[in-house]
Image (tube, helix red, strand yellow):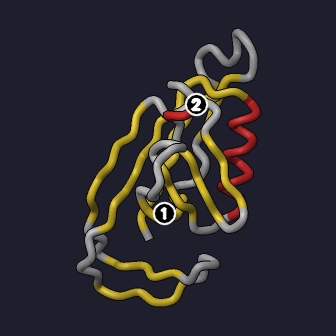
């Protein structure tokens, strides 16, 4: 995809436009049994039986370069609320999300044969 079509993450004073856009986005609606309410810094506020429908986004990335891989690792380590934009040019965010399920990136099939290429999935849940 052209850079103008790439997704974007925004947090605090930082932002990142995906150098290589996701290959696939899966958007789900989930109804959490336990509604985990968190403060902006990620601290747990309260558990309560939730009735709110939340969105979940799963972004698949194939053969991203080492620079983007390291940037994703840095963003994951910030452990903060992120604004997800489907495209860099979108005026409104798709959702305010929390990065869940760790950092499951690994060398891609071609990453070992050529240069540092990584594949993986990012899972976000709406806050």
The residue tagged 1 is: 97
**Helix, strand or loop for disc 2:** helix
Q: Residue at x 67, y 54 (%)?
A: 15
**110 or 41: nearer the viewer:** 41
Residue 51 image position (x, y, % from top left): 23, 79
Query: Quick check: 123 left or right of 116?
Result: left
Q: Residue at x 74, y 30 (%)?
A: 66
The residue tagged 2 is: 3
Give the image quarter of residue 49. bottom left
Q: Residue at x 48, y 65 (%)?
A: 96
Residue count near mark 1 (Cα–Cα under 10 Å), binned few <14, some 14–19, many ≥20: many
User: Where, quadrant-wise, is the C terminus in this rendering?
Assistant: bottom left
Which-is-in-front pick, marks 2 and 1?
Answer: 2
Q: CA distance from mark 2 to mark 1?
A: 22 Å
- Indicate whether 85 appears above or below 69: below
Residue 31 image position (x, y, % from top left): 26, 68
Label 2–label 1 contact, CB within 8 A: no
Query: Quick check: 92 left or right of 26?
Result: right
Q: Residue at x 27, y 76 (%)?
A: 52
**4 or 29: nearer the viewer:** 4
Query: Quick check: 9 left or right of 96?
Result: right
């Amino acid at each position: 995809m052209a850079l103008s079509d790439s997704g974007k993450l925004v947090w605090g004073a930082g932002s990142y436009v995906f150098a290589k856009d996701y290959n696939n986005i899966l958007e789900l609606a989930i109804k959490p049994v336990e509604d985990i309410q968190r403060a902006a810094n990620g601290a747990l506020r309260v558990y309560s039986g939730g009735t709110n429908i939340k969105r979940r986004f799963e972004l698949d990335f194939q053969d991203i370069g080492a620079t983007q891989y390291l940037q994703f690792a840095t963003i994951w380590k910030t452990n903060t609320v992120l604004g997800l934009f489907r495209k860099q040019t979108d005026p409104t965010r798709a959702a305010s999300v929390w990065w869940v399920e760790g950092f499951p990136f690994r060398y891609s099939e071609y990453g070992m044969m050529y240069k540092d290429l990584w594949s993986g999935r990012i899972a976000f849940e709406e806050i």
